[in-house]
Amino acid sequence: MKRIFFNEVVTRDGFQMEPEFVSTDAKIALIDELSACGYAKIEATSFTSAKAIPMLRDAEEVMGRIRRVPGVDYAVLVPNLRGAERALESRADELNLVMSASESHNQANLRMSRAQSFSALTEVITVVNGRAAVDVSISTAFGCPMEGDVPAEEVIGLAQRFADLGVRGVAVCDTTGMAHPAQVAAMCESLQQRLPSGLQLTLHFHNTRGMGLANVLAAVQGGIVRFDGSLGELGGCPYAPGASGNIASEDAIHMLEAMGYDTGIDLERLLAVARKLPDIVGHDVPAQVSKAGPLWQLHQVVCQPA
Ligand code: COA
Ligand code: ZN
């Protein structure tokens, strides 16, 4: 059975976009429950500016109070050196550095040019100096909501430059759900052909146009084994026009388990956590399997009235 590794990003990508602040206690309780579900990694929060991302202004407290389960990597998103210092102080296992493949989204999201971001992140990698793992998320890698097409060459070139700096992995992110399966298949092939084989490749999809799980399937069939997902299908970048939820972790995991892949996740346990999510965020969530039940959960025969 082929092993697929999931990184749960609901408390970062998911909550950064929520209209109402999710309490620190609720975030911590949720991460602790997710820690027991079998994830390889949990991206717990981000060390960003509280003005840019007010929903995650409690990052220190969250990282300080979660119960860390051995075998789970606790990652945090980091946009600059100040974020990296805070992340190291919080004993994050992984710093997930972020910049965009497109100039407009980098400016909107990070208030820097791509060149400024690359040089700031280069400095971060030097400062981290092996004290935590470093991955890089490349946003708008399959298209930019302001510029349109983003050349795959741009993405692969950027990933190569980070690989040269010694990062552990690169996440190729479809920030606003513009990727389609044929594009994903081509991208996966190029990434694996052109980048060093030791570089961990993660795919990060949003379901903004309903292509999320089709894209996961294209990537899995193209040899990718690492995915980001967000419980409930929450998520989105507040500085990407039209952004909406990531692929729902539980729906993607359910699909892959049904197909015979081993995700390492206790799906029943995860679905029980997912069913609490509407109460945590105060609204219904789009994900489906927590409502329908997994396909192996059968129903009683219902007879028509005589
Ligand atoms: N953590 C906390 N505070 C930070 C910070 C960080 N990583 N980086 C900057 N700040 C603070 C500065 O100390 C300064 O505070 P002050 O106003 O009290 O003096 C303020 O933020 C502005 O600093 P500056 O360096 O001018 O940053 P900026 O306003 O140009 O913002 C970013 C740049 C990158 C910090 C900000 O755009 C950001 O946090 N973006 C993240 C966006 C994101 O997470 N998007 C979703 C994920 S893709
Ligand atoms: Zn995202």
Image (spheres, grey):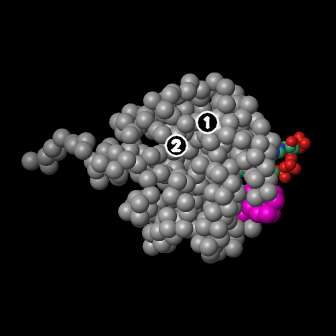
| Residue at the spot 74% in from the left edge and 31% down from the top edge | 89
**Amino acid type of the residue tagged 1 in the rendering:** Asp
The answer to whether any part of residue 268 appears in the image is yes
Image position of 256 with respect to 11: above or below: below
Question: What residue does disc 2 label?
Answer: 8
Q: Residue furthest left?
A: 306
Q: Secondary structure at mark 2?
A: strand
Residue 105: say if magenta.
Answer: yes
Horizontally, residue 9 falls left or right of residue 116, namely left
Label 2 environment density (alpha carbons within 10 Å; few <14, some 14–19, many ≥20) = many
Q: Nearer the viewer, residue 84 or 108?
A: 84
| Residue at the spot 68% in from the left edge and 62% down from the top edge | 161
Question: What residue does disc 1 label?
Answer: 93
Residue 296 locus on image (x, y percent): 24, 44
Label 1 environment density (alpha carbons within 10 Å; few <14, some 14–19, many ≥20) = some
**Amino acid type of the residue tagged 2 in the rendering:** Glu
